[in-house]
Amino acid sequence: MLEEFLYENRRFKADRIFECLGAADLEMLTRSSVTHRYKKGEILFREGGIPTGIYHVKSGLIKKYKQTSRGGEQIFYVCSTGELFGYHAVLSDEYYPDSAATIDHAEISFIPKDAFLTVIHRSNAFSNSLLKALSHEFSMYLNYINNLGTRTVRERLAFDLLLLEDKFNLHDGNVTEIFMSRTDLANMVGTAKETLVRVLLDFTNAGLIAKTDRSITILDRVGIIREANLRGFNRET
Amino acid sequence: MLEEFLYENRRFKADRIFECLGAADLEMLTRSSVTHRYKKGEILFREGGIPTGIYHVKSGLIKKYKQTSRGGEQIFYVCSTGELFGYHAVLSDEYYPDSAATIDHAEISFIPKDAFLTVIHRSNAFSNSLLKALSHEFSMYLNYINNLGTRTVRERLAFDLLLLEDKFNLHDGNVTEIFMSRTDLANMVGTAKETLVRVLLDFTNAGLIAKTDRSITILDRVGIIREANLRGFNRET
DNA sequence: CGGACAATTGAAGCCGGTCAAAACTGGTGG
DNA sequence: CCACCAGTTTTGACCGGCTTCAATTGTCCG
């Protein structure tokens, strides 16, 4: 049931979305795309900016966030290898409603807006595939909202650690170290840095995790799941 | 800027979505739809249920909500006249991720899944129109998440009152009374009934609103906007 | 070896949740 | 028409999770 939930938290895997495309369309996309390397903390786009294309994560993690009134940032999603992002604004033909930045070194492809839209207008199958994917995404955000509105910091942190472990795991099957600054993690959980640190200490003392300054490793997965208190989270028949 | 935000909070207006349809497709939808009257509190569909079609609000208000772990409900959207709902689950071909119930008496049309999907597969223009609408919806939910995660109960309540006034206003241009139970309102703001009542009292004492038991009227719109503290809410250049 | 930044710890205070009980409302049947 | 009941709204009191402010320690890097 946790696995099921983590699955729900993966958005557009490019492979899956693109697989309904014919060879010509697929080539058009790949041919017009450009790949770049980014350093930690580079901003790909900002709230209010004009979208010019969509992004495809080759490696690394990307945080999607929104500015808060007090100057902080609220991270509401983390993209990992294979995921697409930045497509909402292109599709709705509006300004970006959020910002995106790298959490760490990353390699990202950029597909220009025109190519993307052309393919959409050409292929109804692609449109429908996107529709399905977008609709699915909603249930994910609903869970997020539920999470944010009804759970304690402790529960949310436990949950986010599981989620991040999953995201970081995608690189290779063995390492389960979570590299993320305390600030980013706090912004993701939706709490103050100080509170985050204290709960992390709790978890460490309870033997649930180990933290080596800039990385966190889950030692007792079952224990963390217990802390996340996922009862009644998803649809329970 | 508030207006702009309220605009963002309107989802699928059926008229706008359907206007790209040809006569044949449009007729197929209207012909196969059925309209019913519902009493207050009737449930249209539940979390985990199997979707069989989409809904179109003729009159009345509908709450969309998710069950919380402690048996409460978290309202994350209110549909008013003209809006469509229940389409996400149909599009993504999954179980309902949320529930929908009437807030008051309502009249609602039901369009069977098959008819809806047939039209989608037939019309690329319709698919693309939906894509655009769905994508737009995301920015709305992002704002909602931002709201929930970073603002006080007081601010959220003020904001939700403005939003509800807008929703209730759709019936006719003059009345701006908000009919909603304290419980529903609390669930919408994301707080306890008791807290909600206290803040409402505050607002009343400050002359911002008037409450006659089951209804609330905004007296000082500017004052409420100030309480909502919308600075830096949306994209600010 | 500093200097800047990140992480940690401490202490105080408030927002908001929870529990419990009273006041009020509308609806119902005698 | 009135008394009563069930559900909702309101008020009161208490407590605890989190935020905030401030200061200290730790760490990376030029």
Image (cartoon, coloured by chain):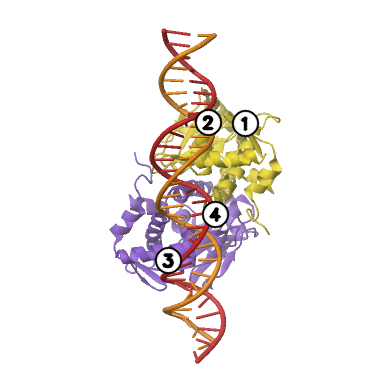
Chain colours: A purple, B yellow, C red, D orange
Q: Are marks 1 and 3 in contact (CB under 8 Å)?
A: no
User: Is disc 3 on the same chain as disc 2?
Assistant: no
Assign a secondary structure to mark 4.
Answer: helix
How far is the residue under mark 4 from the one under mark 1? 46 Å
Q: Position of residue B98 (x, y in %)?
A: 45, 40
x and y, in percent, of residue B175 in the image:
68, 29
Label 4 with label 1: CB-CB less than 8 Å: no
| Looking at the image, residue B115 lies above or below residue A143 | above
Which residue type does callout 4 highlight?
Answer: Thr
Percent x, y of residue B199 = 57, 42
Q: What residue does disc 1 label? A: B23
Marked residue chain, label 4: B
Dot 2 or dot 4: first in sequence order is 2
Query: Visible in this render: residue A60?
Result: no
Report the residue marked by disc 4: B150
The numbered mark at residue A146 is none
Circle 1: residue type: Ala
What kind of residue is marked 2? Ile
Quadrant of residue B122 in the image?
top right
Q: Residues within 10 Å of mark 1 (few under 14, many from 20)?
A: few
Nearest the eye: D3 or B68? D3
Pointers 2 and 1 within a single chain: yes
Return the mark for residue B103.
2
